[in-house]
């Protein structure tokens, strides 16, 4: 019996509050990825209403993420850009892109969409609108995808300069949109000029994207990364959980702040801190184990209505986000520890595969593109390198790094 099959059978014996039974057959991930790619290519669409009204043939270029949030009754551009970028990233991460013309052409159409829409003013430019604005989610995901395309040599020569310029502009926009105290948040106080806390859920992926840009040699004030990391450290509780919004002066440890409520964002936060020398492998491992231990609470909210429902205020859209970032976090662990944890993550994903061979954590059919793409990214997590790990630079970060090193030193005393 293979290791993966043993893991699946072991998990099936657990009491998991899910209507979906874990399949007893051996997962065929190669077939699943192939089917998922075909589904994603066929799901590409156009939401341009002017094109839809015209008699001209509409060019399908995007994969909009659909959720309950609307702007003027429409899916906001941040969700359109972010959703498209994530699907594109999943399509380029699977080997064989150049030999698959349908997939390659789909990615190029998506790239034209990102080049045109990622920073289209006013709703995707510098700024923040009202109390809720997802534009920076689109900026983060677009930045990560373009950088990854550069690494994989997936950008045609004629588009290299426009893509380089887009990366520079995305970085500049994220720097401009930084919260005064550091980090980013899609939900802020409405009163003009009022300070708002950072969202670890959003800030950690932003840090990873900016670290990758730094590694590519793009020039910007790296203190924006350090300030964001400071907010992540400030949001970390003794339990290992991270607050929903950074507010160290008001810690409850309950609801959002219970480990069950935070298990979806713990791994990405610890990964970002680990890359900056502010966390050790033990913390990263604990974050992944917390996700697996409390997975049942994420599963209870998958594909359900509403967003932050009690007792732990877990939103359905945390589900695949958690799997993808837990899978990526494994790169911070000793190599011998990675595969057993990876197989447990994949077993969970196989458990929730839809009858149509896609993955969806929302009640909206369109959002299956996001869920399926995030699943592919989780599967390919070990092949997609993290940004470079660097030594701590700021005094606060150096203090954390020193503490980690002290904790890792073997004891010189005699054990009694």
Image (cartoon, grey):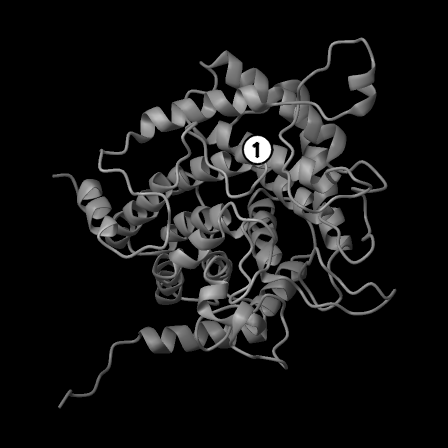
Residue 199 placed where, x, y %?
A: 63, 62
**Relative depth, front residue between 56 and 282:** 56
Residue 402 placed where, x, y %?
A: 44, 75
Identify the residue at the far front of this view. Answer: 19
Q: Decide if residue 146 is in sight here.
A: no
Question: Quadrant of residue 239 in the image?
Answer: bottom left
Question: Quadrant of residue 293 in the image?
Answer: bottom left
**Relative depth, front residue between 48 and 69:** 69
Q: Decide if residue 76 is in sight here.
A: yes
- Circle 1 sits on which residue? 365
The residue depicted at 70 percent of the width and 23 percent of the height is 46
The residue depicted at 49 percent of the width and 64 percent of the height is 262
**Relative depth, front residue between 406 and 253:** 253
For residue 264, side relative to residue 83 (left or right): left
The residue depicted at 84 percent of the width and 39 percent of the height is 121
For residue 50, side relative to residue 354 (left or right): right
Residue 283 placed where, x, y %?
A: 39, 66
Which image quarter holds the N terminus? Answer: top left
Residue 253 placed where, x, y %?
A: 51, 77
Give the total of numbered labels: 1
Which image quarter holds the C terminus? Answer: bottom left
SS of the residue at dot 1? Answer: helix
């Amino acid at each position: 019996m293979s290791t993966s099959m043993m893991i699946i059978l072991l998990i099936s014996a657990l009491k998991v509050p899910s209507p979906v039974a874990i399949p007893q057959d051996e997962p065929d991930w190669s077939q699943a990825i192939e089917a998922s790619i075909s589904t994603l290519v066929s799901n590409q669409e156009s939401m341009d209403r002017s094109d839809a009204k015209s008699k001209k043939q509409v060019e399908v270029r995007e994969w909009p993420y659909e959720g309950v949030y609307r702007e003027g009754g429409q899916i906001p551009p941040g969700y359109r850009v972010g959703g498209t970028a994530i699907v594109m990233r999943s399509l380029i991460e699977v080997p064989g892109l150049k030999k698959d013309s349908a997939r390659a052409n789909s990615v190029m159409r998506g790239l034209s969409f990102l080049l045109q829409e990622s920073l289209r003013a006013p709703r995707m430019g510098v700024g923040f609108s009202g109390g809720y604005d997802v534009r920076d989610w689109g900026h983060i995901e677009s930045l990560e995808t373009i950088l990854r395309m550069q690494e994989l040599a997936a950008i045609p020569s004629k588009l290299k300069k426009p893509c380089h310029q887009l990366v520079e502009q995305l970085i500049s926009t994220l720097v401009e949109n930084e919260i005064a105290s550091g980090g980013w948040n899609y939900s802020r106080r409405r009163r003009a000029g009022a300070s708002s806390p950072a969202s670890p859920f959003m800030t950690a992926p932003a840090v990873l994207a900016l670290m990758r840009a730094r590694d590519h040699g793009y020039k910007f004030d790296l203190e924006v990364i350090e300030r964001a990391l400071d907010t992540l450290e400030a949001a970390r509780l003794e339990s290992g959980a991270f607050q929903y919004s950074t507010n160290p002066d008001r810690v409850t440890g309950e609801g959002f702040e219970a480990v069950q409520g935070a298990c979806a964002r713990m791994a990405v936060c610890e990964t970002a801190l680990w890359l900056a020398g502010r966390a050790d492998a033990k913390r990263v491992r604990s974050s992944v184990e917390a996700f697996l231990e409390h997975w049942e609470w994420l599963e209870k909210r998958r594909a359900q209505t509403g967003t932050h429902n009690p007792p732990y205020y877990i939103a359905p859209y945390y589900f695949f986000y958690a799997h993808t970032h837990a899978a990526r976090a494994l790169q911070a662990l000793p190599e011998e520890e990675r595969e057993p944890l990876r197989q447990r993550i994949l077993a969970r994903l196989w458990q929730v595969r839809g009858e149509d061979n896609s993955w969806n954590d929302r009640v909206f059919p369109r959002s299956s593109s996001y869920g399926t793409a995030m699943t592919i990214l989780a599967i390919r997590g070990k092949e997609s390198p993290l940004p470079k790990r660097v030594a701590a630079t700021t005094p606060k970060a150096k203090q954390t790094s020193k503490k980690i090193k002290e904790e890792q030193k073997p004891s010189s005393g005699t054990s009694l």
